[in-house]
Image: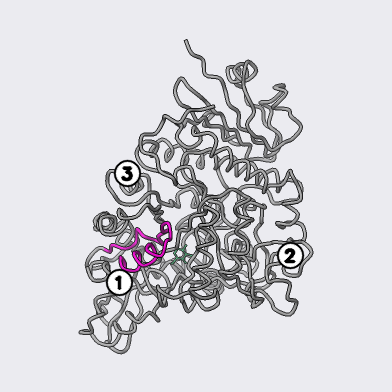
Amino acid sequence: MATDNFAPNKNWWHHSVVYQIYPRSFFDSNGDGIGDLNGITMKLDYLKKLGVDILWLSPIYDSPNYDNGYDIRDYFQIMTEFGTMEDFDRMLEEMKRRQLKLIMDLVVNHTSDEHPWFIESKKSKDNPYRNFYHWAPGKDGKVPNRWGAAFGGPTWTYDIITGEYYLHTFTSKQPDLNWENPIVRQEVYKIMRWWLDKGVDGFRMDVINFISKVPGYPEGHVDDGRQYSDGTPYYINGPRLHEYLQEMYEQVLRHYNIVTVGECPGAHLHEAELITNPARKELDMIFTFEHMNIDGGRRQTFASVVHSGNHEGKWIPKLLDLRELKLHFTTWQKGLIGKGWNSLYWNNHDQPRIVSRWGNDSSQYRVLSAKMLGTCLHFLSGTPYVYQGEEIGMTNVRFPLLADYRDIETTNFHRDAIQSGVSLEEIMAVIYRKSRDNTRTPMQWSGSLIHGGFTNGVADVKPWINVNSNYTDINVEDALNDSSSIFYYYQKLIQLRKEMSIMVYGNYDVLHEEHMHIFMYKRFNEGIQEIIVACNFSQQSVTIDDSSLNERFKKNGRLLISNYDDNQVNNKSDWLHFRAYETWAIELPVETE
Ligand code: NOJ
């Protein structure tokens, strides 16, 4: 087994696994149809059993909930539907008792338009809070520029009181804070210190690479026929981003033993290197979107996107090309090992379920492909994130009516697409594929209780969003009763990471790079240890021709984990012949001279 000598700068979060909780949909302890903090506390033993170390909660602060808590009205209060500050304190205490760490969602690119700062800011041009937000006069009686917002519509909204426009890169209910103003930054640091002093262990920072805007708000490029321009070059990875992050590090982060992860849409390897290089003192890791955008046709034609909004090309169907995915991971693995740190994720509250997306959610292949995807991710270098329900292979949902959907991005998209004359059939097909509600349906705890056991079994209370009807087959209760379930497979992956430091600190290289169906890579410590991981991303059987690998494995190789239980790999015969969605990881002896 590996020794632990490979990384000079080790941190506790390098070998941790994070579990993301979307509190609204996790567990409802008081029967009102909405998940809550006491519900989380009640399920801590379940999470401990899975073996994860860090829990990340999507926002739990007071919010009018236009974007499910990503629009904060009061950073120091708990959302009433989720409980009280006493519930929070109890939850934190219970987490600590189980050696579970907690990271909070920090949403400070924008606030809610109901936040007292914004209410003041609107009042007059000389209000002390005016400069907390971005305000600009119109041009020729129109918006300051034609930037389109993330969920459709413009980024500027006119306010009658002062006759100016305010900026919102998301919805008009989420005005962007003006980080140019040093007082805003100090207020943000106060919020951070307040929660850190309470004992939380870090932050996931919402769209943190949006905080610096190019002064003057230059007009963006407008594609032919589009109503809105692309403003992202002027507010993503902006000119003062690194300065702000370094100031935040200096004034807050360095004083605590915590972990930080910045959500960074539009950040590529170069930004990741800058942000996560420990010597630069910014953040510990970032969430990139590169791999999540691989199966969407950003800015390609789809009637709705072309004519009305600035919705990203996520809605445009495109098949996954595994070679692109491999290229992404290989670039980031090689780019950050020894220089920064990767975060590893397939899922979160904004992405469809991975087993439906790049696996296969039919009854025949769901379990196999979910395990394959887990293996692929967990053996990479970085900190893995598991999103609630991923560990039992929860799938996308297909609600019959738009009225069943809750997500603002989805409903805006539907509205704009209808206006552009796209057929309902086409719209629903892409919603089924990509809507954020796919991952926001309630956690499926039981196959026999109403609403999958999410709302404490109260029959006449409906969850805030319907449970996926497949809860009768896919649920925690059954997973825990089946030793070959995805749950126990994930448990083993998490355990292996704790036992084998090569999974955390080893080098990386890709093998059979051009193969259309197999993702094979190695983790290694030169001359000491080597692991090979292989994943068949397809339903087809595929044979890999690799005699040197075959020889080395037959000589002295050892199977670490696999998703077929008939021991083909263990018997070392025909083991490079992959069945549908087959995956394994093996340890190979390293030849020493
Ligand atoms: C990213 C969050 O993950 C998403 O859910 C939210 O809608 C936007 N940021 C705006 O806060």
Secondary structure under badge 2? helix
Q: In the displayed structure, does residue 435 sit left or right of residue 170?
A: right
Q: Residue furthest top?
A: 593
Mark pair 3, 2: CA separation: 45 Å
Q: Report if the beta carbon of the residue with label 1 is closer than 8 angstroms to ligand 1.
A: no
Question: Which circle, 2 or 1, is nearer the viewer?
Answer: 2
Q: Which residues are magenta?
A: 188-213
Query: What kind of residue is marked 1?
Result: Asn
**Residue located beneath label 3 in the image:** 277
- Say whether residue 209 is magenta: yes
Query: What kind of residue is marked 3?
Result: Asn
**Residue located beneath label 2 in the image:** 469
Query: What kind of residue is marked 2?
Result: Ser
Q: In the displayed structure, does residue 186 sit left or right of residue 314?
A: left
Looking at this view, is 182 or 548 the one in front? 182
> Is label 1 in contact with label 3 (beta carbons under 8 Å)?
no
Mark pair 2, 1: CA separation: 45 Å
Secondary structure under badge 3? loop
Looking at this view, is 104 or 298 the one in front? 104
Q: Position of residue 478 (x, y in %)?
A: 75, 54
Dot 1 alpha-carbon crowd within 10 angstroms: few under 14, some 14 to 19, many 20 or more: many
Residue occupying image coordinates x 61% and y 69%: 423
Residue occupying image coordinates x 73% and y 43%: 484
Residue 145 tag number: 1
Question: Which circle, 3 or 2, is nearer the viewer?
Answer: 3
Secondary structure under badge 1? loop
